[in-house]
Image: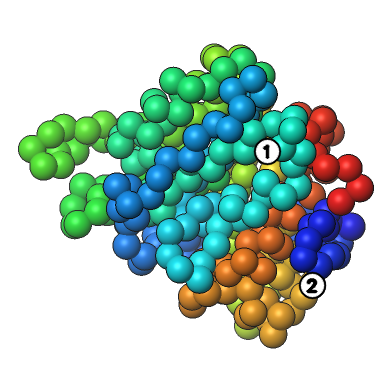
Amino acid sequence: MLPRLPSPAPWHFAILTVLGLIFPVAALYGEDARPVEDAASIPVQKIANPALPTLFLVGDSTVKVGTSGQRGWGEEIGLFFDRSKINVVNRAIGGRSSRTFQTEGRWEQLLAELKTNDFVLIQFGHNDGGDISKGTRPRASLKGSGDENVVVAIDGKEETVHTFGWYIRKYITDTQARGATPIVCSLIPRKIWTSDGKIVRASENYGKWTADAARATGAAFVDLNEIVAREYEKLGKEKVETFFADEHTHTNVAGARVNAASVIAGLQALKENPLAPYLIPHL
């Protein structure tokens, strides 16, 4: 069973195996048409109790969203944790990619607060496609997991742009260097169905590159893309339609809770779940 929420109602879902057919459609992942969130309008969540370990969440609008009626899974996942034992701090922000979360200084700000025995849960990929240096929001990373890079000019300043896998590895290794524990998730799937009733996966692009980064650095990996896709397929189109607040990317509260429960199920399926001591038992 997937973990269930203590309120307002039980959420019973089967733990889903990470097996099955894969439908790689790279063009459908890596770019989100939603405007970039204005950081000035979004308060930075603070650590409630500095004496406790902290679980930081890092990601895009599918983890934390600022639009009314929409909800990211990171905004619901705190319901699964005993807050007398651990802080849950959501630093995700809409419109950011693995690249721009770093270039805007958000990652350095988090690192300044990160301490030994903290945790960082990382999910990117929805905004890593598109333009590298042109347009109104150049935020793309290079495709792949390699060490290649390219130098671009943006507003008269040079920037070295790396691969998606390179940025994910940096999140991981920076976290490890501070004695904290990184956990990486593949991006949640969008509500895009194939003709035979399957959800389109990102298993040949951003999901794969996230797994590659985890494997290369020894970090824990939750294949959230696959777990959620299988849950949506089990529940069916009609039910899944009620989980979304837009065409296919951003969930409402109900959808966010399903996806948060899927993150917890993925953690519980790990050989060693580093967050196990902090979860509310019997959910």
Q: Nearer the viewer, residue 16 or 84?
A: 84
Q: Is residue 219 above or below residue 143?
A: above
Residue at point 50%, 71% (across, down):
69
Could you say which disc has been placed on residue 106 in the image? none
Residue at point 54%, 43% (across, down):
90
Residue at point 77%, 65% (across, down):
8
Q: Quadrant of residue 194?
A: bottom right
Could you say which disc has been placed on residue 234 in the image? 2
Q: Nearer the viewer, residue 7 or 72?
A: 7
Q: CA distance from mark 1 to mark 2?
A: 23 Å
- Give the image location of residue 6, x and y in percent: 82, 57
Q: Amino acid at mark 2?
A: Lys
Could you say which disc has been placed on residue 221 in the image? 1
Q: Amino acid at mark 1?
A: Phe
Q: Secondary structure at mark 1?
A: strand
- Give the image location of residue 78, x and y in percent: 67, 46
| For residue 99, side relative to residue 278 (left or right) | left
- Give the image location of residue 237, x and y in percent: 68, 81
